[in-house]
Amino acid sequence: MKNKFLRKLIMVEVIFILYILGIEKSAFSQDELSQNEKISLQPQTVQQKTLADEDAPVLEIKKSNENSSLFIIELKNADLVDFFRVLAHSYRLNILVGEKVQGKITASFTGVTLEEVLERIADMYNLKMEKRGNVIFIKPNLVTKVFYLRHIEAKTLLEEGSSEEEEVSEGSFQNQGESSSESEIVKSRKATIYDLLSGEGKVLLGKQFNSIMVIDYPKNIERIKSYLEMVDRGMSSRIFKLKYISAKELVKESEEESKEESEESALEETTQESNE
C-alpha cells in the first residue's frame, strides 16, 4: 500500500517537472523569436533613418578656424528666406527680404566673407542687394526698360493678332501696300514677345509715342531687345512663316548670326595679316 502511494507521488512529481520544462521552453522560444524580429527590423529602421537624413535640408554657417572674418557655409536644399534669416540672427545683420524672394539653395562656400556669399547668391537668383545705412534690402532684380519702335506700331505688337498665316519676303516693305503688309505681319506674329518674359516679367504700352515698357530681369530684357530690333527692321532679308516662328527662335538665330559674323571678321583679319 505504501509502495503504491510512493509510485503515484513520483509520477505526479515527474508530470509537474515536465509541465514546468514545457512552459520554460515555450517562453524561451518566444523570447528568441522576439529578438530575431528586433534584429531583422533594425536594419530597415536604420535604412529609413538614413534616407530621411539624406533628404533633410542642411543649413550650416560657421567661422573659419584660420581667419575669423572668413566663413564656411554648407547649404543643401535650404530655403532661401530661412538662410537670410539665420544669417541675420546669428551674425547681427539687419536684412530685409522682399516677399517675392523664394526658392531653394544648394551650395558650399569655404573661406569667404559674408558679403561675398550674399553677392554670389544674389547673382545666381536674380536678386538685387541694396544697403541703406545699416540695413540690407534684398528683392528680385527687376529692371524697367523703354523701347522705341520706328516701323511697327507698338499697340499692335502687344495685341494677340489673328490666326491667319502670312509670309514676309524681301522688299515687302517697299511696295505700295507698305502699311497693310506691316499690319498683317504683326497680326500673324501673335504677340510672341510674351514668350521671352519671365514669370515675374511684364510688358506694357509706353507713355511716350510708339514705345513699349518692359519690366523683367536683365537677361530677359536683353532678349526682348534683340527680338524688337529684329522685328522692327522688318526682317526684310529673309522669308518667314511668322505664325509658327516663336520669339525664342528668332533671338537664338540672331545670336548665332552675330557669332558667325564675329568668326568671319576674325578670319578676314588673319588672312590680311598673313598676306602682308
Image (tube, helix red, strand yellow):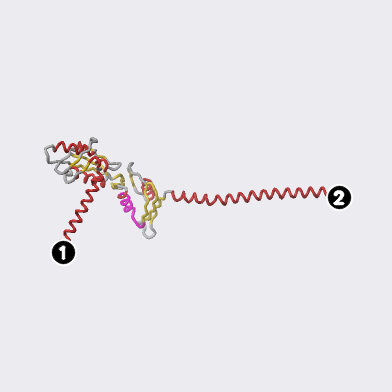
Assign a secondary structure to mark 2.
helix
Q: Is residue 159 above or below residue 230?
A: above
- Location of residue 20 in the rendering, given as x and y in whole percent from the top left corner: 72, 49
Residue at numbered disc 2: 3
Q: Amino acid at mark 2?
A: Asn
Mark 2 or 1, closer to the camera: 1
- Location of residue 241 in the rendering, given as x and y in whole percent from the top left corner: 22, 41
Q: Is residue 229 visible?
A: no
**Is residue 8 rendered to the left or right of residue 182?**
right
Q: Amino acid at mark 1?
A: Ser
Local crowd at mark 1 within 10 Å, few (<14), some, or many (≥20)?
few
Task: Tell me the tag on residue 274.
Answer: 1
Magenta stretch contains residue 152: no
Identify the image quadrant of the C terminus: bottom left
- Location of residue 200 in the rendering, given as x and y in whole percent from the top left corner: 29, 41
Give the farthest residue toward the left: 176
Q: Is residue 185 above or below residue 23?
A: above
- Location of residue 24 in the rendering, given as x and y in whole percent from the top left corner: 69, 50
Q: Which residues are magenta?
A: 110-122
Residue at (50% x, 51% y) in the render: 47
Q: Is residue 131 above or below residue 267?
A: above
| Mark 2 → mark 1, Cα distance in angstroms | 133 Å
Task: Tell me the tag on residue 174.
Answer: none
Assign a secondary structure to mark 1.
helix
Q: Earlier in the sequence, mark 2 or mark 1?
A: 2
- Magenta: main secondary structure equals helix
Q: Is residue 72 above or below residue 215?
A: below
